[in-house]
Image: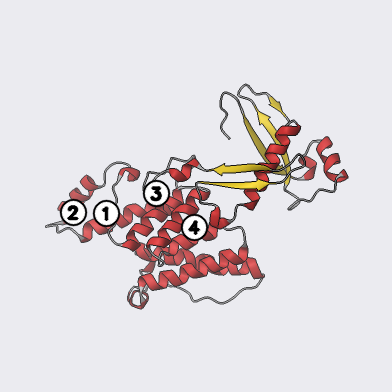
Amino acid sequence: MLLGRRGKWTVLYGRIDEMPFGDVDLWEDAHLAVARTSAYPVAMWYGPDGERRRPRARELADLTAILVAFARTTEARSTAVAGSHEVPGADGSRTVTLAIPELLVPLDATPPRRPGPPDRRAMERLTAEIERFAQSSLFESVEEANAALRQRFSGPIDDLPSTATTAHEKAQDLVYRAFEARGRRRIQLARKALELSADCADAYVVLAEQSHAPDAARALYEQGVAAGERALGPDVFAQEAGRFWGIVGTRPYMRARLASPRAWKTSTGATRRSNTIVS
């Protein structure tokens, strides 16, 4: 939450013993439903100078309508730039329009820098670019190759133009950006990647990570495994045993394969055997 000159509203969720006593009494007296024991909401306005206050009746009705609209936004509609919902309330219905300006940004735009360490998976983009550069170049010596690599790949990776040419390479580039994005921008990028190539295993991994339903996540990871197998082809599994992880193109498949049994265990409480990949 970033504070502007006029402050910002926020809704925090926690246990019932973390709520103000007045809220607890009202919640229990009205027998209101709650999704889980850690999902009791508290709405608060935070001002730029440290002031705080609770919502008035009209503001509380507006916040409630917005949250209902969010709850009605399906995963399929979650990457729309804007969408309207008619929400009933105690003082009449109102129209809530949800807009996500970040989704207007071009898909190939450099992701904004986020606090904390970068996603290590996104760093594989540099390795992929180096591989493509090396395969398309002829060098007289190792020294010449190293000099060319230093010249070509100096500077921040985000400033490095993409050399992806095939649909699958372009799809993977979008997923590298998705790894560095968050929220619905990740979903938008992953779905666009699948439009380019249905064999983009990492796109399924991103969608599975964004899913809150264990069964749906498991199905997406399994689709990722199948996509990775199609993208690699059977010869890679036979010919590259012993150095499988060293090939950057195998890693999307391995990420989906690693997560798939975990998702199965989460959703069913059971375990299953999976083939071991020698790396």
Q: Which amino acid type is marked by label 4? A: Val
Q: Which residue is mark 2?
A: 145
Q: Residue furthest right?
A: 29
- Whole-angstrom CA distance, mark 3 to mark 1, is 16 Å
Q: Earlier in the sequence, mark 4 or mark 2?
A: 2
Q: For mark 1, what is the residue?
A: 163
Q: In which image quadrant can residue 4 be found?
A: top right
Question: For mark 2, does the 10 Å Cα neighbourhood hold few (<14), some (14 to 19), or many (20 or more) residues?
Answer: some
Rendered image: mark on residue 107: 3
Q: Nearer the viewer, residue 38 or 103?
A: 103
Query: Which residue in the rendered view is the most extreme toward the left?
Result: 140
At label 2, which amino acid type do we have?
A: Ala
- Counting residues from the start of the chain, the first of labels 2 and 1 encountered is 2
Element on which disc 4 rests: helix
Q: How is the image coloured?
A: secondary structure
Looking at the picture, does residue 198 appear above or below residue 109? below
| C-alpha distance separating marks 4 and 2 | 35 Å
